[in-house]
Image (cartoon, grey):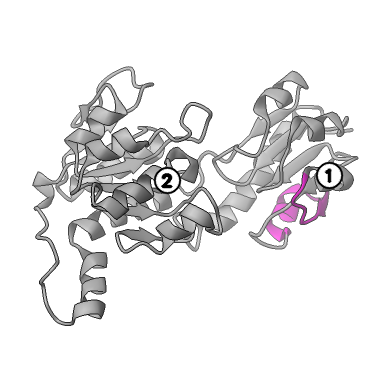
Amino acid sequence: MFNVVITDTNLGDGSHEREVLEPEFSVAKHDVTTAAEVIEVAAEADGLLVQWAPVTDDVLAALPRLKAVVRYGIGLDNIDLDAAARRGVAVSNVDDYCLAEVADHAAASIYAHNRRLAAGSRNLAAAGWTTAGISQPPPPGQDPVGIAGFGRIGRSLAARVAALGFPVHVWDPFLTETPEGVTTWPTLRELAAAVGHLSLHMPSTAETTGVVDAAVLAALGPEGHLVNTARGALVDEEALLAALDGGTLGFASLDVLCSEPPTGVSAQLAAHARALVTPHIAYLSTESLPQLRVRAAQILADLLRAHGGQA
């Protein structure tokens, strides 16, 4: 029988996973946060279900039975993919998780800013019942949305904002053809210069870290709106803070930060008057978390069965 270890999760007690995996596989649930702790609890593991615990090269080297790792979620930032490939360990995410929820959250952020909801609420609290200090929003048809990264979430967002009347512009270096009904741009900076809202939908990699830098923010401009529901590392937060402080960027709607819970610059952004920051909740719905747990377990079971079903 293969041994499955849930290294860490704040999503529940493991009952959904056990329903999928037992009795075919044995399941042990832990709550560990360091590489050393992963090695300790997973020494006999054939499969891992991981949320945030690190699966580094050292971890992989110390787990000789390991055959597969599945992460609860889409991002694989905490797993050394190259090391896993070298050691023949299969790695998967749950790539169909919370797609609609994140697209909804990004669309809501864009529409809320277009209608000046955050600015109006703060202005009411500070100055009373007055429209003074609230800029007049353009109609959606004159307020183009830029989408950086045109995978499934980016495409879902495009459908939502287009239905509300916003023109859609896209930058994605991996696009091979121009999608119908959108305008494409060759660089992220050119996209930012062409739109009023810039929404990020890219993975966090060495190439995308800090891709939204001072130049991109300057191109987005003093009326521009940055939306990030993807990964905090995509944004140079010091440049973002400087742009918001200096008024060279209009507003930011952030569901993710470089530091969570926020400290340092991230904390300054979380409290900024020109930002609407939510605590990494774009994935939330009554259905998304149970589905994530079940799908992660199903994917891991399939990967282990591919090894013959027996240790």
The residue labelled by disc 1 is: 36
**230 within the magenta span:** no
Q: Position of residue 16 (x, y in %)?
A: 68, 57
Q: Which residues are magenta?
A: 14-34
Q: Is residue 29 magenta?
A: yes
Q: Nearer the viewer, residue 194 or 164?
A: 194
- Determine which residue is flagged by label 2: 238
Would you identify the image quadrant in which residue 306 lies?
top right
The amino acid at mark 1 is: Ala
Mark 1 burial class by Cα count in 10 Å: few <14, some 14-19, many 20+: few
Residue 79 % position (x, y): 67, 35
What element does badge 2 sit on? Answer: helix
Left or right? Give the position of 163 relative to 85.
left
Q: Is residue 280 visible?
A: no
Q: Position of residue 309 (x, y in %)?
A: 82, 33
Is residue 89 toward the left or the right of residue 98 in the image?
Answer: right
Q: Residue at x 48, y 61 (%)?
A: 279
Q: Quadrant of residue 82?
A: top right
Q: Are marks 2 and 1 in contact (CB under 8 Å)?
A: no
Q: Nearer the viewer, residue 54 or 182?
A: 54
Q: Is residue 118 above or below residue 213?
A: below
Q: Which mark is residue 196?
A: none
Question: How far is disc 2 from disc 1 in space, using C-alphas?
Answer: 32 Å
Q: What kind of residue is marked 2?
A: Glu
Say which residue appears at 58% left-offset and 50% top-offset: 292
Picture quarter with the C terminus? top right
